[in-house]
Image (cartoon, rainbow, N blue to C red):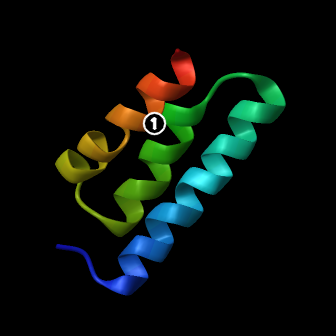
Amino acid sequence: MFDGATLVTVAGTFLIAGTVKGVIGLGLPTVSLALLTVAIDLPSAMALILAPSLVTDL
């Protein structure tokens, strides 16, 4: 599905977005979607942020 470089990029993106959410309390979907669309297409990026957004909001 994805190659190794893309998986590292996705993991790094969620690490950065999670740090932003931890510091200011919001922004995971905004930051992660913006960074993911640089590496992959928009529909795939939107699908990838569904689960982490739901989990962090619970």
Q: Is residue 58 above or below residue 56?
A: above
Image spot of residue 26 (x, y percent): 66, 23
Looking at the picture, which amino acid does disc 1 mark? Pro
* Residue that protrudes farthest toward the right in the picture: 23
Q: Nearer the viewer, residue 39 or 25?
A: 25
Q: In this rendering, would 54 be left or right of 45?
A: right
* Residue that protrudes farthest toward the top in the picture: 58
**Residue placed under numbered mark 1 in the picture:** 52
Quadrant into which the N terminus falls: bottom left
Image spot of residue 27 (x, y percent): 61, 29
| Count of numbered circles on the image | 1
* Residue that protrudes farthest toward the bottom in the picture: 4
Q: Nearer the viewer, residue 1 or 45?
A: 1
Q: Is residue 44 above or below residue 49?
A: below
Quarter assignment of residue 37: bottom left
Q: Nearer the viewer, residue 43 or 50?
A: 50
Q: Residue at x 29, y 83 (%)?
A: 3
Mark 1, secondary structure of its residue? helix
| Residue density around tag 1, few if under 14, some if 14–19, many if 20 or more, within 10 Å | some
Image spot of residue 56 (x, y percent): 56, 26
Q: In this rendering, would 50 be left or right of 17?
A: left
Q: Residue at x 45, y 63 (%)?
A: 10
Quarter assignment of residue 4: bottom left
Q: Is residue 58 above or below residue 2?
A: above
